[in-house]
């Protein structure tokens, strides 16, 4: 028998992500696969279906907002025409691998004949550091000469033993037209020479990527992260200060090591420099955020450079929320450009923005200085707050999302490349919309309508996942490295009888494993949801204890409204479910070394880590816990769904169904009771997963290769995107400036 549910129409409906009902019409946004959208309208009276254009759909959607949509001449933003002639991949599975696509496409295009190789030659000849030529000198003026010189160099090098230092044959190569930058030994120079000869003969995208990745192009890097308290001590748990800060501090260490290694291997004697540009906060609350310059520990050439926020009325002295920063950023960027120039005695080669505010500043700087721009979002707020675009007015006072989404559009379209921690960040999954994808088409009624905001197929997107600092987050079984001197203080933290501002609650039965969670006490992190789920399940409470780290215990110590609400909720849950004896709440912990050991101590008692957020951009705590060998249960909404392979190296949980979460935890701990090998199996697989995919070493190698490749293509092709930048400039001046003037 024919069933309605098997009909093509119902199949289509299954891909609907949104439906708007304004009788007699039902308009739908259909998403047959990640990154691909179609729009349709059903007339429920006449039972017919029409396709809609994106603009028609958005116009219909605007009708939800009283009267706002009636304005006929709404500003429509459309970035599609700028990229229309530039192909992108079409398969959803290729999203996030932009560099590969770009190399394949552009190498076939560029290497059609000898003339089309000229830009490569110009690029190699333009290479300089501090005014000194690198790679090629004036003796090589055309491709034929380059080819013949390479052949001669090959001959010279073949006569040398592989580890002959560059200085021994520098003079001879210089005579052939080569300068430093090819390698530090005969062996490495000869590898580079072969790579280039191969490219000139028969270009292959992988060879091209290896060659470009090796050319020393990045010596000075600027990383921008204006919000929160950016420092190295006493900052975690302060407002707006979490994973992003950790990410950047780990990132710059890894990047410096990789740059030093690369520079040395290419035979150069150059010191790189990395500057993290952030806000200087005069009232720094016991942190170093009032210092202009601070060296990053564990590095030689990396500094935090702080620049004040100022207006015509003077310097802003206090911390302000990331949601209120928009009016300060243009002046901040201007001031920062002078400070950067003073520190570097030149301009950076690469600028990396972080989060919406940092990416906007990176945009202003890259526009001004003409340098390669990389964006990192960490988390885009749009997907965190459902309908924050269409109902923007509801959120405006508290969050100023109009500024944020406008800044996001400008920054993501200006960036040369964007790196994300996961695929889902770009294009979601089969059923969930990606963070960037949510900018494809949306409307801010009364302000503007975006018909093509960003294309997730754009080859600027690349997945480069972060890791965890292995000096701190290593497996519990690595007994020799264990920080046993911290065990006394951890013991007190978890089991100590004292009830104070640092910790409350007791664990009466120490023989039980511990479920552990650590996060900022924001609503979206849903730590209170985990406590409630535990409180409600007598079976789970029988099997395990619960320990959570986060926020303040004393509500009067908090300065953050959202956190205050969560603190009060936590206290009331303790009473409501009478958690005494089975639950411990520890305030936010700032000592990362001890936090690493804490994860391992939880592993010692065969516990598990639970990350119950309603939404998590990436989730560094998950990588940390798994690095320590702690079996991990994490939200299926956002990045964790990708870090963990469900049932193999951890588990996905659905925070909206706490009963299921409890059942999964019960099932896990019961299984561990019957078969203690099960815990080890998940623990080992978790560690293996991180080791293979989520390390800072893999990250920094990749990031530098991308900087090289995008820098090259920007130089030699139309990727400079001048027309897009002009359009963005107008949008910035006419729209964004106006918005921030209303603060
Ligand atoms: N963290 C910490 N102490 C706390 C809470 C969090 O050291 O009390 C650290 C945690 O170890 C992790 C980071 O802060 O390195 C949080 O990053 P994540 O990506 O999990 O979330 P975010 O806070 O960035 O949303
Ligand atoms: C911000 C977040 O919200 C987290 O999900 C990430 O792990 C963190 O930044 C680092 O990228």
Image (cartoon, grey):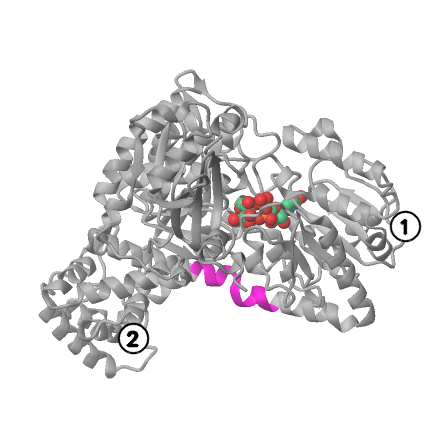
Q: Residues within 10 Å of mark 1 (few under 14, many from 20)?
A: some
**Quadrant of the image containing the C terminus:** top left
Residue occupying image coordinates x 52% and y 54%: 431
Q: Is residue 420 visible?
A: no
Above or below — where is 666 with respect to 720? below
Residue occupying image coordinates x 76% and y 57%: 663
Above or below — where is 555 with respect to 589? above
Task: First in sequence, mark 1 or 2: give its number.
Answer: 2
Residue occupying image coordinates x 36% and y 60%: 705
User: Which residue is disc 1 drawn over?
Assistant: 508
Numbered circle sitting on residue 191: 2
**Quadrant of the image containing the N terminus:** bottom right
Where is residue 706 shown, x and y percent of the image?
A: 35, 58
- Horizontal side of 497 relative to 430 (left or right) equals right
Instruction: Give the quadrant of residue 585.
Output: top right
Q: CA distance from mark 1 to mark 2?
A: 64 Å
- Horizontal side of 267 relative to 672 (left or right) equals left
Is residue 533 inside the magenta stretch? Answer: no
Magenta region: which residues?
A: 688-700
Instruction: Give the quadrant of residue 357.
Output: top left
Instruction: Give the quadrant of residue 575.
Output: top right
Where is residue 447 shown, x and y percent of the image?
A: 37, 27
- Magenta segment, principal secondary structure? helix
Q: Residues within 10 Å of mark 2 (few under 14, many from 20)?
A: some
Circle 1 SS class:
loop
Residue occupying image coordinates x 65% and y 45%: 519
Mark 2: C-beta under 8 Å from nearest atom of ligand 2: no
- Compare residues 181 and 642 and report the one nearer the observer: 642
């Amino acid at each position: 028998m024919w069933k309605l549910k098997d009909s093509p129409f119902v199949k289509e409906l299954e891909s609907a992500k949104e439906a708007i009902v304004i009788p007699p019409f039902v308009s739908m946004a259909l998403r047959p696969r990640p990154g691909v959208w179609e729009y349709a309208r059903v007339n429920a009276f006449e039972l017919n279906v029409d396709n809609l254009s994106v603009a028609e759909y958005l116009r219909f959607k605007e009708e939800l907002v009283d009267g706002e949509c009636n304005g006929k001449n709404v500003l429509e933003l459309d970035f599609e025409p700028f990229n229309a002639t530039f192909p992108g991949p079409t398969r959803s599975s290729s999203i996030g691998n932009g560099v590969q696509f770009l190399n394949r496409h552009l190498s076939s295009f560029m290497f059609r004949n000898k003339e089309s190789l000229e830009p490569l030659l110009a690029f190699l000849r333009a290479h300089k550091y501090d005014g000194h030529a690198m790679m090629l000198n004036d003796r090589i003026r055309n491709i034929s000469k380059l080819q013949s010189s390479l052949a001669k160099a090959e001959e010279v090098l073949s006569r040398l033993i592989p580890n002959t230092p560059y200085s021994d044959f520098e003079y001879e190569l210089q005579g052939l037209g080569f300068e430093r930058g090819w390698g530090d030994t005969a062996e490495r120079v000869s590898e580079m020479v072969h790579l280039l000869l191969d490219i000139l003969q028969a270009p292959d995208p992988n060879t091209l990527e290896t060659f470009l990745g090796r050319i020393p192009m990045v010596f000075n890097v600027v990383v921008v992260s204006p919000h929160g308290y950016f420092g190295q001590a006493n900052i975690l748990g302060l407002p707006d200060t979490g994973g992003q800060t950790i990410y950047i501090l780990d990132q710059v260490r890894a990047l410096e090591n990789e740059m030093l290694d690369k520079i040395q291997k290419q035979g150069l004697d150059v010191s790189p420099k990395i500057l993290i540009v952030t806000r200087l906060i005069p009232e720094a609350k016991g942190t170093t955020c009032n210092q202009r310059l601070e060296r990053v520990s564990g590095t030689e050439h990396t500094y935090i450079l702080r620049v004040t926020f100022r207006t015509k009325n003077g310097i802003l002295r206090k911390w302000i929320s990331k949601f209120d920063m928009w009016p300060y950023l243009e002046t901040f960027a201007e001031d920062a450009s002078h400070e950067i120039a003073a520190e570097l005695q030149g301009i950076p080669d690469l600028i990396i923005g972080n989060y919406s505010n940092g990416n906007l500043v990176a945009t202003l700087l890259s526009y001004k200085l003409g340098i390669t721009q990389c964006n990192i979002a960490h988390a885009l707020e749009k997907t965190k707050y459902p309908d924050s675009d269409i109902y923007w007015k509801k959120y405006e006072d508290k969050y100023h999302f109009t500024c944020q989404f406008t800044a996001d559009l400008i920054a993501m379209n200006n960036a040369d490349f964007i790196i994300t921690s996961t695929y889902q960040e770009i294009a979601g999954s089969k059923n969930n919309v990606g963070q960037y994808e949510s900018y494809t088409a949306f409307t801010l009624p009364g302000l503007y309508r975006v018909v093509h905001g960003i294309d997730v197929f754009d080859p600027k997107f690349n997945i480069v996942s972060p890791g965890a600092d292995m000096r701190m987050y290593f497996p519990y079984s690595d007994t020799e490295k264990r920080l046993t001197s911290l065990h006394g203080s951890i013991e007190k933290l978890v089991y100590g009888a004292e009830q104070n501002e640092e910790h409350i609650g007791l664990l009466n039965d120490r023989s039980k494993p511990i479920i552990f969670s650590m996060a900022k006490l924001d609503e979206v992190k849903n730590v209170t949801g985990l406590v409630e789920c535990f409180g409600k399940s007598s079976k789970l409470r029988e099997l395990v204890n619960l320990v959570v780290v986060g926020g303040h215990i004393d509500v009067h110590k908090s300065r953050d409204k959202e956190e205050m609400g969560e603190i009060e909720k936590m206290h009331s849950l303790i009473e409501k479910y009478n958690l005494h004896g089975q639950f411990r709440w520890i305030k936010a912990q700032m000592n990362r070394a001890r936090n690493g050991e804490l994860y391992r101590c939880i592993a010692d008692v065969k516990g598990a880590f639970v990350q119950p957020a309603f939404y998590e951009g990436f989730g560094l705590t998950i990588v940390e816990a798994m690095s320590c060998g702690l079996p991990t249960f994490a939200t299926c909404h956002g990045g964790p769904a990708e870090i963990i392979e469900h049932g193999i190296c951890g588990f996905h949980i659905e925070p909206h169904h706490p009963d299921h979460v409890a059942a999964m935890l019960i099932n896990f701990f019961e299984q561990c009771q019957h078969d203690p090998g099960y815990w080890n199996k998940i623990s080992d697989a978790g560690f293996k997963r991180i080791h293979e995919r989520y390390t800072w070493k893999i990250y920094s190698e990749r990031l530098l290769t991308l900087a090289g490749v995008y820098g090259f293509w920007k130089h030699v092709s139309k990727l400079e995107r001048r027309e897009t930048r002009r359009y963005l400039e107008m949008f910035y001046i006419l729209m964004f400036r106006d918005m921030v003037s209303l603060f």
